[in-house]
């Protein structure tokens, strides 16, 4: 039982490049989330998926897109990376409101 | 004004001390309240969950929620060096579905 897994763990991009962050959970949870964490800002919700087939914007969705591929997988795409997107990205899943289980994170640097 | 305010610290205490961590919030619709612990370069892990007001105890950890004051606390008794981490408060409301708002986190150092 791996919980929530994320790939890659680290990534360096140049401005304008695109990439997809992958997330998978094996706990059969309905809801999945993408957050970014910046110093002094806490965790900010980018997008979430309350259930398979649905996605909604969070607090900071600009510059990102998501796909809920199936119940297990939820990906985050940066179409044209910008230095302001340098951050640590966390994926999470939950079945009960508030009790989220987080992945290990992806450290992204955009030059 | 942020919806959730949390002192970033750092907070440094000697081993064995009682630690008090706090958050204030402004949204009276919040119904569930959590504390997450995050070790350096790791993902947050759920430590305590409380629904509505009251206290909850789990081992050395006690969570308190005072909805009338919009104030939540986490107490750590007999603190250990292994408790050194960043502690994030978090909360959400039924009207917001499963969306949760996180505080910025308080860094705690427990010195041996």
Image: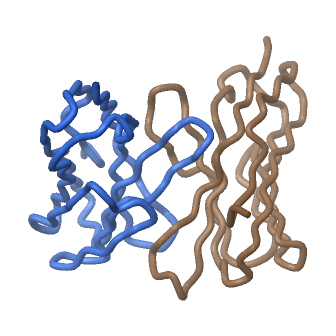
Of residues A82 and B37, the one drawn nearer to the viewer in this rendering:
A82
The C terminus of chain B sits in image quarter: top right
Residue A65 x, y percent position in the rendering: 20, 60
> For this view, does A69 lie left or right of residue B73?
left
Relative to residue B78, is residue A51 depicted above or below? below
Give the quadrant of residue B68.
Answer: bottom right
Residue B52 vs A68, above or below: the answer is below
Tell me: A102 left or right of A32.
right
Q: Residue furthest top?
A: B112
Question: What's the colour scheme?
Answer: by chain
The structure residue drawn at horizontal position 41% and vertical position 53%, both measured from the top left corner, is A101
**Which residue: 33% across, 51% down?**
A91
Residue sticking out furthest to the left: A69
- The residue located at (15%, 50%) in the rendering is A79
Most distant residue in the bottom direction: B95
Decide if residue A39 is on the left or right side of residue B33: left
Where does residue B100 sit, x and y in percent of width and height? Answer: 52, 67
- Observer-nearest of B96 and A5: B96
**How far from the left and from the top, in percent, is residue B33?**
66, 67
Q: Is residue A47 above or below residue B11?
A: below
The chain letter of the blue chain reads A
Query: Above or below — where is B78 with respect to A65?
Result: above
Q: Does residue B22 appear left or right of residue A103 in this picture?
A: right
Q: Quadrant of the N terminus of chain B?
A: bottom right
User: In the image, what residue occupies the spot 62% across and 60% down?
Assistant: B90
* Count of numbered tags: 0
Residue A34 percent location from the top left of the image:
34, 56
Determine the image quadrant of residue B52: bottom right
Q: Which chain is brown?
A: B
């Amino acid at each position: 039982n791996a919980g929530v897994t994320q790939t890659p763990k680290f990534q360096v991009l140049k401005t304008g490049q695109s990439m997809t962050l992958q997330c998978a959970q094996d706990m059969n949870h309905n809801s999945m989330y993408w957050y970014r964490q910046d110093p002094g800002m806490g965790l900010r919700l980018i997008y979430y998926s309350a259930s398979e087939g649905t996605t909604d914007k969070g607090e900071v969705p600009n510059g990102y897109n998501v796909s809920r591929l199936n119940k297990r997988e939820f990906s985050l795409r940066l179409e044209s990376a910008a230095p302001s997107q340098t951050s640590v990205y966390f994926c999470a899943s939950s079945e009960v409101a508030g009790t989220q289980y987080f992945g290990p994170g992806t450290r992204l640097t955009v030059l | 004004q942020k919806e959730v305010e949390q002192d970033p610290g750092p907070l440094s205490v000697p081993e064995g001390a009682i630690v008090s961590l706090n958050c204030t919030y402004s949204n009276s619709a919040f119904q569930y309240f959590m504390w997450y612990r995050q070790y350096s370069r790791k993902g947050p892990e759920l430590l305590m969950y409380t629904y509505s007001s009251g206290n909850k105890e789990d081992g050395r950890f006690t969570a308190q929620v005072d909805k009338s004051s919009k104030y939540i606390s986490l107490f750590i008794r007999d603190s250990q060096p292994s408790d050194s981490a960043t502690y994030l408060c978090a909360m959400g409301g039924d009207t917001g579905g499963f969306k949760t708002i996180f505080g910025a986190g308080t860094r705690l150092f427990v010195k041996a």
